[in-house]
Image (cartoon, rainbow, N blue to C red):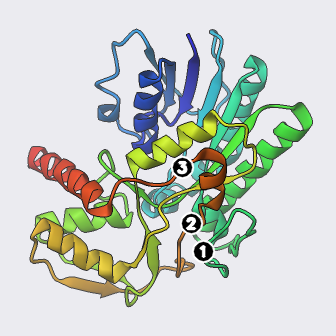
Amino acid sequence: MTTSLVTGGAGFLGSHLCERLIAEGHHVICVDNFLTGRPRNIAHLEGRPDFRLIEHDVSQSFEVKEPVDYVLHFASPASPIDYLELPIQTLKVGSLGTHNALGVAKAKGARLLLASTSEVYGDPLVHPQPETYWGNVNPVGPRGVYDEAKRFAEAMVMAYHRFHGIETRIVRIFNTYGPRMRPRDGRVVPAFIQQALTGEPLTVFGDGSQTRSFCYVDDLVEGIFRLLMSDRSDPTNIGNPSEMTILQFAEHILKLTGGDSVIEHRDLPIDDPKTRQPDITMARKHLGWEPRVALDEGLAKTIAYFRELLTHQV
């Protein structure tokens, strides 16, 4: 049986990826220390013969006894709240964690896929952002702990690819949403939905003219799986190029939830990107991939998830 090891497998994206790999016939080893991941995200997988959980911080070295075919490194705080509260852990998992994941891949002769991010482009001066753009990142700003951790991780992955001949893949993930996001993790989709469902003001930073694009998690996982199985070693953007302003998005969430919350403007965070839109030419060309889930369809599923979650919390 094909075996895949997923670091951060109990996180939002990692848990969906574990499910997809199992559906593809893989035996999945999930490694997570639950710093930002949640046991409930994988509770339905535990007890299966094709799933195993190792509770461990991948910033510390680890070994796996069985053969491994694929290593997918998804462990990392990924929301602004998380990496601002956990700056050292974020830097460590991007550096030491990536080194350890590569060590497992090297020892097992496995292919490694790194979960990188659109944040490597920083506050971009090129729009939309192609993989050839080197970015506009402030290394000493508060967001630098995440941006530079991922940029370093990409450099290390390519070093192992070139020096050790390891098969590697790098996915640059743009804004993704869906069930299993945490209500108060600081990202705009769960923040707006949670606020709208509880009648709180929707907090828009700045005047709301900054843009984002939103990809539903099922589309993202499809793109990641295609990249994993492809022969493309260069970084690849996966995201939805359909773009809208944050203010438009807030108004849309209010419409879909039927909420009557007011929109409250707050100061723009330091180094907050003004635009974010993926150029997915390479994904279309090399993977035959593009997003298929319409925004309203994906948001309906996500809102339903949060309604149920908030009901159980009450």
Q: In which quadrant of the rendered view does residue 20 lie?
A: top left
Q: CA distance from mark 3 to mark 1?
A: 18 Å
- Residue type, label 3: Trp
Residue identified by numbered label 1: 128
Q: CA distance from mark 1 to mark 2?
A: 6 Å
Q: Nearer the viewer, residue 176 or 226?
A: 226
Which type of secondary structure does the marked residue at label 2 adopt? loop
Local crowd size for mark 3, using a 10 Å CA cut-off: few (<14), some (14–19), many (≥20):
many
- Residue type, label 2: Pro
Residue drawn at the location 22% of the way across and 70% of the way down:
253
- Residue type, label 1: Pro
Given contact means CB atoms under 8 Å apart, are the residues at marks 2 and 3 in contact? no
Q: Mark 3 against mark 1, which lies toward the viewer? A: 3
Given contact means CB atoms under 8 Å apart, are the residues at marks 1 and 2 in contact? yes
Which type of secondary structure does the marked residue at label 1 adopt? loop
Residue identified by numbered label 2: 278
Given contact means CB atoms under 8 Å apart, are the residues at marks 3 and 1 in contact? no
Can you tell which mark lies on residue 289? 3
For marks 1 and 2, the one nearer the N-term is 1
Q: Mark 2 against mark 3, which lies toward the viewer? A: 3
Q: CA distance from mark 2 to mark 3?
A: 13 Å
Q: Position of residue 28 (x, y in %)?
A: 49, 21
For marks 2 and 3, the one nearer the N-term is 2
For marks 3 and 1, the one nearer the N-term is 1
Residue drawn at the location 64% of the way across and 17% of the way down:
68
In this view, the residue farthest toward the right is 163
Q: In which quadrant of the rendered view does residue 263 lie?
A: bottom left
